[in-house]
């Protein structure tokens, strides 16, 4: 409840101040086509669907450290998130491969804590739910809810299968005024039935853009 109230207050702040934006500066952009990993820790580059992306990851992730930011009151962070292969969403229980959680953290504060499901509905019509576009564990949405493209090819266990990867475009506007920002992209994935966890489910990121906004 406190997080919901904070989010509403921040939305109100941003909405009320949007007409008084003094300056909006793009301070970082990376589409990884040049394989540039400056300012990034634990970065790896792979080709996916005709483009370079940072990833793939399973039970890990990467950090983006930005320093010497201009004076600002907000930062806007946007990126493309690819969810590859057999993500199980909100599934829990003994022998169940989930929940499959993905997180985005800025300066130690959690701004995305959600699950994704790439699973098909079963014969009874049950669709293994995910929390996105809300946070886990309080929401149950159909698989691939909020996706920009739900029909991309899988990469490993589901290699070549259309619908094996789902693309989400995530944007977060965050109250922030420090001269530096540490952005952490992480997962908390669960698999109990495979020796090659990364081949079972993984994720990657593309087109990271950060703007510093002064009011």
Image (cartoon, rainbow, N blue to C red):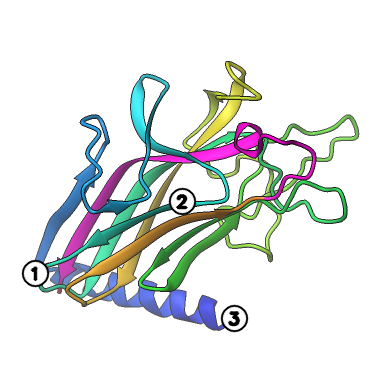
How busy is the neighbourhood of tag 2: few (under 14 within 10 Å), some, or many (20 plus)? many
Pick the quarter of the image with the N terminus: bottom right
Label annotation for residue 61: 2
Q: Is residue 204 magenta?
A: yes
Label annotation for residue 22: 1
Task: Give the residue drawn at x 17%, y 73%.
Answer: 179
The answer for how far apart the CA atoms under marks 2 and 3 are is 28 Å
Q: Quadrant of residue 105?
A: bottom left
Q: Secondary structure at mark 3?
A: loop
Instruction: Specify the farthest residue to the bottom.
Output: 2
Q: Secondary structure at mark 2?
A: strand
Residue hosting label 3: 1
Q: Marks 3 and 2: in contact by CB < 8 Å?
A: no
Q: Is residue 91 left or right of residue 9?
A: right
Q: Is residue 117 left or right of residue 15?
A: right
> Magenta part of the protein: which range?
190-214
Q: Is residue 91 magenta?
A: no
Task: Give the residue drawn at x 37%, y 39%.
Answer: 44
Task: Give the residue drawn at x 15%, y 74%.
Answer: 215
Q: Secondary structure at mark 1?
A: loop
Instruction: Specify the farthest residue to the right.
Output: 124
Front position in the image: 45 or 207? 45
Front position in the image: 43 or 208? 43
Between disc 1 and disc 2, whose residue precedes? 1
Residue 36 in the image: state x and y as whole percent: 22, 39
Disc 2 vs disc 3: which is toward the camera?
A: 2
Between disc 2 and disc 3, whose residue precedes? 3
């Amino acid at each position: 409840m406190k997080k919901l109230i904070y989010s509403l207050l921040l939305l109100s702040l941003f909405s009320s101040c949007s007409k008084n934006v003094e300056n909006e500066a793009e301070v970082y952009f990376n589409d990884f086509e040049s394989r540039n990993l400056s300012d990034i820790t634990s970065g790896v580059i792979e080709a996916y669907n005709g483009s370079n992306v940072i990833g793939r990851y399973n039970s890990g992730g990467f950090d983006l450290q930005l320093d010497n930011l201009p004076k600002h009151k907000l930062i806007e962070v946007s990126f493309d998130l690819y969810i590859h292969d057999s993500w199980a969403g909100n599934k829990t229980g003994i022998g169940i491969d989930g929940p499959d959680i993905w997180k985005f953290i800025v300066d130690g504060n959690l701004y995305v804590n959600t699950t994704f499901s790439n699973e098909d509905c079963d014969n009874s019509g049950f669709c293994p739910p995910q929390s996105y576009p809300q946070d886990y564990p309080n929401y149950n949405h159909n698989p691939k809810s909020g996706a920009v493209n739900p029909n991309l090819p899988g990469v490993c266990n589901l290699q070549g299968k259309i619908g094996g990867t789902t693309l989400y475009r995530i944007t977060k506007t965050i109250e922030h005024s420090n001269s530096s920002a540490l952005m952490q992209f992480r997962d908390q994935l669960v698999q109990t039935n495979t020796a090659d966890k990364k081949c079972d489910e993984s994720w990657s990121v593309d087109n990271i853009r950060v703007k510093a906004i002064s009011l």
